[in-house]
Image (cartoon, rainbow, N blue to C red):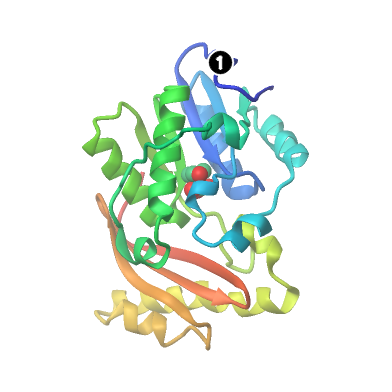
Amino acid sequence: MKIVRTIAALELLGEAGLVPTMGALHDGHRSLFRAARAENEVVVASLFVNPAQFDVAADLSAYPRDEQQDAEIAEEEAVDVLFAPSVEEMYPAGFATWVDSGDVGAEGAARPGHFRGVATVCVKLFNIVQPRRAYFGQKDAQQAAMLRRLVRDLNLGVQIRVLPTVRDQDGLAVSSRNVLLSEGERKEALALPRALARGVEAYTQGGDPVAATRGALNGLPPDYVELVELDAATVLAAAVHVGPIRLIDNVLLKGNLS
Ligand code: PAF
């Protein structure tokens, strides 16, 4: 695997699949790498903690970083190129152009500027790497919905592939932020996937999935619980606070995501 730090040094051969990441790679990323490996000649992973998408400075400074471990995981998953630019490489002095993706659902409203930062960095990565396909996790359902709309609106020639959320054995969706949870907080956090499961149950019985989820959060303060339309799918999505950590998760109610 080649590690590339500058845009100029990124020479691609053949049809590429791109997995954009902010590092702290976990099993969710592994599933994206595997899908990309199966569908493309060349697999590029980007590793860039994008300051433009953090609405809270403390969240940016606390974001877990371990490039050596990330490089090992990417190598194990047969990634061809790890693109790991510096902040200056991506946002050089004088940078002033932003992609305004508009809000998508309550996640956009809860984190002002977040989707603008994600949209801008993704358009930059799509232009730099010129992938045929780009891979994202269902856990970030509103992000995926925003990116699909962006690609449609701006006629970008990249297919947005959305892969199912990977969960630990106890049901918690894998996330880079999980390493920040204490043992007790991790136990409390399990109320989130359990509450979403109550929501699915209510939905299948003709009830209100949002109310059922809210009622089963076991005291975790929610930012929101909402239904998100994602092309041919509807997902039930929620964000909650567990101590100082904000976690998001969602489940598919109908349709399919890929
Ligand atoms: O989902 C993420 O990790 C980030 O939002 C992304 C897509 C890599 C953009 O920085």
Left or right side of 226 for 37 = right
- Give the answer, above or below, for where 15 lies relative to 237: above
- Crowdedness near tag 1: few (<14), some (14–19) or many (≥20) residues, C-alpha within 10 Å: few
For residue 212, which quarter of the picture? bottom left
Q: Nearer the viewer, residue 156 or 50?
A: 50
Name the spot of residue 252 as percent of width and height, x first.
37, 61
Q: Quadrant of residue 130?
A: top left
Mark count: 1
Relative to 34, residue 248 above or below: below
Residue at (58, 67) in percent of width and height? 171
Q: Quadrant of the C terminus?
A: top left
Q: Position of residue 143 (x, y in %)?
A: 39, 51
Mark yes or no: residue 131 visible.
no
Q: Is residue 131 above or below residue 67?
A: above
Asked whether residue 40 is in view, the answer is: yes
User: Where is the N terminus found, in terms of image quarters?
Assistant: top right
Q: Which residue is mark 1?
A: 8
Q: Residue at x 39, y 34 (%)?
A: 123
Residue 33, percent across and down? 56, 36
Left or right: residue 71 versus residue 145 is right
Q: Quadrant of residue 79?
A: top right
Kindly identify the residue that appears in the image at 28 percent across and 52 percent down: 102
Q: Secondary structure at mark 1?
A: loop
